[in-house]
Amino acid sequence: PHSLIEHFDWCIGTSRGKCEIMMYRNAFLSNDVYMPSVRLPLNTKMYVSVMAYNNVNLTIQGSSHAFKVDVTPPVTISKPKVHLITSPFTQKKNIQYDNSVLKLSWLFNDDESKISHHTISLKSHQGKKVPYEQIIYENINSITITFNSTKRLINGDRYSVIVSACNLAALCT
């Protein structure tokens, strides 16, 4: 015969099984806990340790992988830039002759947690629907967008590109 789990205790510490940041707390039989307003240290590797107790007071312990608290979003190193495909037959600046291609580059950095993804939005200054509204990409620093023959940039229109970077803490720039 075996004894069922009676309750779980959990704590937070700087190594597995150590509880100096938050002492053990009873989680009853819950598989998750919510602790609002907990003040955890920044830039410190921490672990959540869980102790399971059965009805005869035998225990087993497990711990999470290390985690850190990150309160800062990614930093912009190089603002998003449109690389125009210009015609050798025009002297005008900020004019692109090919409405089927858009080349972009940017650079963000995050020293605390890695950048998880970028969101790219293309907006028309005329308020018209654009063929490319919002797409999320993994951690890349440039892209070439090719529009098909039915969804191209509108000749004579002006566009803005917005690129945001989000880190693993879900903080975005």
Image (spheres, rainbow, N blue to C red):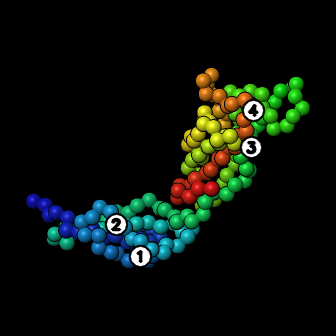
Question: Label 3 near label 4: C-beta < 8 Å?
Answer: no
Q: Which residue is mark 4?
A: 156
Location of residue 116 in the rendering, given as x and y in whole percent from the top left corner: 55, 49
Q: How many marks?
A: 4
Categorize mark 4 by other alpha carbons within 10 Å: few (<14), some (14-19), many (20+): few
Compared to residue 55, the image places residue 96 above or below, namely above
Considering only order in the chain, which callout, 2 or 3, is on the residue closer to the N terminus? Answer: 2
Callout in the foreground (2, 4): 4
Q: CA distance from mark 4 to mark 3?
A: 20 Å
Q: CA distance from mark 3 to mark 2?
A: 44 Å
Q: Amino acid at mark 4?
A: Gly
Give SS at disc 4. Answer: loop
Give SS at disc 3. Answer: strand
**Residue visible at 81% across and 30% down in the picture:** 86
Q: Which residue is mark 3?
A: 81
**Residue 33 tag number:** 2
Location of residue 53 in the rendering, given as x and y in whole percent from the top left corner: 23, 69
- In the picture, the quarter occupied by the N terminus is bottom left
Categorize mark 1 by other alpha carbons within 10 Å: few (<14), some (14-19), many (20+): some
6 on left or right of 60? left
Question: Label 1 near label 2: C-beta < 8 Å?
Answer: no
Q: CA distance from mark 2 to mark 4?
A: 56 Å
Location of residue 26 in the rendering, given as x and y in whole percent from the top left corner: 29, 73
136 on left or right of 127? left
